Image (spheres, rainbow, N blue to C red):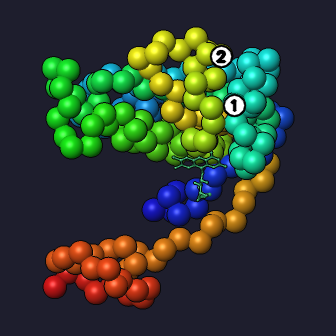
Amino acid sequence: MRGIRERRSIRSFQDRDVPDDLLSQVFEAVRWSPSRANPRCREIIAVRDPGLEKRLRETVGPGNAAAKSVVSAPVVLVVCGKLGRAGHYHGRVTTRFGDRLLFDLGIATQNLCPAARDPGLGTVIVGLFDHEEAGRIFEIPPEHQPVALVPPGCPSRVPPAPRRREAAEFTHFKRFRNDLKPGKPPGLE
Ligand SMILES: Cc1cc2nc3c(=O)[nH]c(=O)nc-3n(C[C@H](O)[C@H](O)[C@H](O)COP(=O)(O)O)c2cc1C
């Protein structure tokens, strides 16, 4: 729980490299993340090239708080997903939510970030960028989509935690209620 509570999105990094063996641990964490029917929809591109990182930064708008992190981190991971795999069975969608690519990649990324944090690396998930341009930069085939950028590195600044809704404001018991308020959750009756 402490690991969850104390994790922060890190957007500025020290000028220190991330060794390959640490990166391998991070990739292992993605490998072991849950994924229905092992749909093999995940791909990760590790970028260590300053020229490519500069081009990648241009895909992240200047108004994005994480824009600098893409060039200041020693490596950037481009988390990609293959369309038509997650949430599909024999080529057909199995739930009302369509392609569950984002769900599977979200879980994989949520494994990735704490695995990076174990040895002291910080990360931020960058979801707001020009996905098409990133696809062109890394020659990603059209059936795969770059979904998130995650720069791991040694944190140089840990920001304060943004305010969260209290658990009591989103925890419903027995039935959905629109009038949940902060305070102590009523508990299971
Ligand atoms: C799917 C997703 C996309 C995100 N995209 C961005 C982004 O484009 N830029 C950014 O600065 N932070 C981004 N974040 C990080 C959130 O802003 C951050 O998690 C939130 O402000 C809570 O702060 P904390 O992670 O430090 O608790 C993203 C987070 C998620 C889960």
In the displayed structure image, the side of residue 7 where residue 16 appears, left or right: right
Q: Is residue 24 visible?
A: no
Residue 129 in percent (x, y) is at 63, 36
Count of picture labels = 2
Residue situated in front as seen by the camera: 68 or 159: 68
Q: Give the alpha-carbon distance from disc 2 to disc 1, as whole Å.
A: 10 Å
Residue 120 in percent (x, y) is at 65, 44
Crowd class of label 2 (few under 14; some 14 to 19; many from 20; radius 10 Å): some
**Three-letter amino acid code of the residue under disc 2:** Ile
Counting residues from the N terminus, which is met first, the one under dot 2 or under dot 1? 1
Q: Quadrant of the N terminus?
A: bottom left
Residue that numbered label 1 is attached to:
59
**Three-letter amino acid code of the residue under disc 1:** Thr
Residue 27 in percent (x, y) is at 49, 27
Q: Secondary structure at mark 2?
A: helix
Q: Which mark is residue 163?
A: none
**Relative to 127, is 78 above or below?**
above
**Relative to 163, is 98 above or below?**
above
**Relative to 11, is 137 above or below?**
above
Quarter occupied by residue 185: bottom left
Residue shown at the point (71%, 26%) measured from the top left: 56
Residue that numbered label 2 is attached to:
137
Crowd class of label 1 (few under 14; some 14 to 19; many from 20; radius 10 Å): some
Residue situated in front as seen by the camera: 140 or 106: 140
Q: Is residue 70 visible?
A: yes
In the displayed structure image, the side of residue 84 where residue 139 appears, left or right: right
Quarter occupied by residue 59: top right
Tag 2–tag 1 contact (CB < 8 Å): yes
Residue shown at the point (28%, 87%) measured from the top left: 186
In the displayed structure image, the side of residue 102 where residue 22 appears, left or right: right
